[in-house]
Amino acid sequence: MDNEPSGTALTAAAARAAHLIVDDEPRIFADPLAAALLGDRAAELTGYHTLHGTHPVLAGARVQVTCRSRYTEQALARAAAGGVRQYVILGAGLDSFAYRGGCDGSLRVFEVDHPASQDYKRAALAVARIPVPGGVTFVPADLAADSLAGCLADAGFDAAAPAVVGWLGVTMYLTAAAVTATMTAIAGLAAGSELIADYMLPEGSRDEAGALYGTLVAQASAERGEPWLSCFTPAEMADIAARAGFGDIRAVSQRDTIPARFWRRTDALKPAALAMLFHGKVPSR
């Protein structure tokens, strides 16, 4: 299929798909559509996990993608129960939320991504015969050049109403200046809006498992042309967020993204000090 998404989007979807194949109960997160969206590469990409599922990098990838997705979608569910009706997925990649019943008629989902990645995803959905709900809007954007607010406005986003923004698996590939600019744009959304974003910890803040994962994955990412460009301590991220205009700022460790019972496991999944989740809200002005 032409117009493939980034290697990161493919490997993240493969890790979500493999979690349902390789790992034991309790499942951290269920994405039954991930394999279908990988198309004819599903067997290849999930096969690495099937053959080498206990490898710390592959197990670490499954922990990373499942924990951040579970946390984000649960935060969205709470916000939706409180009346929020808009969900923006920045760097949507092969995220399948909207196609797993996430669009129930009351929630609008705006998938923001590079046009080539969106072309691949739309073709993959068609091949897999996965219908696109009416509440989904694809927002083609190159955020290095385009205005997020402008792209959302053109897509019919209601700037006067709050939204939840999920920004997963992206910040490490951006410069600190680009992260700051995007967070400032998101902080300009309506009061009550929330942002959940993951970010990598710097080397000195990682534990042994996080250090191993970070070294190997950063090297592999650089070799495929997607180098890590930024890492932040929780204090640094909180400072960026506060200056951008966020309130109620939280830093959530990988261990704390899910209930403690999910870490009582018989497989290779373990929390690591590698990445954090930022969770902040836009205060009333």
Image: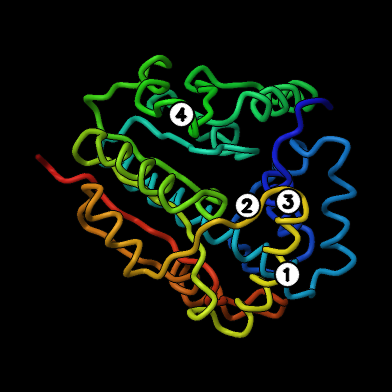
Question: Spatial distance from mark 4 to mark 1, Cα to Cα?
Answer: 34 Å
Residue at image point 40% right, 26% down: 147
**Which sits earlier in the primary sequence, circle 4 or circle 3?**
3
Q: Decide: few, some or many residues near mark 4? Use Cα within 10 Å; few <14, some 14-19, many ≥20.
A: many
Q: Which residue is mark 4?
A: 109
Which callout, 3 or 2, points to the residue nearer the camera?
3
Q: Amino acid at mark 4?
A: Val
- Vertical comparison of 272 with 193: above or below: below
Q: Which residue is mark 3?
A: 11
Which callout, 4 or 3, points to the residue nearer the camera?
3
Determine which quarter of the picture holds residue 256.
bottom left
**Which sits earlier in the primary sequence, circle 3 or circle 2?**
3
Instruction: Pick the quarter of the image with the C terminus.
Output: top left
- Vertical comparison of 18 with 149: above or below: below
How has the structure been colored for display? Answer: rainbow
Q: Amino acid at mark 1?
A: Leu
Question: Spatial distance from mark 1 to mark 2, Cα to Cα?
Answer: 26 Å
On residue 30, which mark appears? 2
Residue 251 position within the rendered picture, expressed as x and y whole percent measured from the top left: 35, 66
What is the residue that sits farthest to the bottom in this orientation? 208
Residue 105 position within the rendered picture, expressed as x and y whole percent measured from the top left: 43, 23
Query: Helix or strand or loop: what does disc 1 sit on?
Result: helix
**Which sits earlier in the primary sequence, circle 2 or circle 4?**
2
Circle 2/circle 4 CB separation < 8 Å: no
What is the residue that sits farthest to the left in this orientation? 285
Q: Is residue 198 left or right of residue 217?
A: left
Q: Amino acid at mark 3?
A: Thr
On residue 216, which mark appears? 1
Which callout, 4 or 1, points to the residue nearer the camera?
1
Residue 38 position within the rendered picture, expressed as x and y whole percent measured from the top left: 78, 39
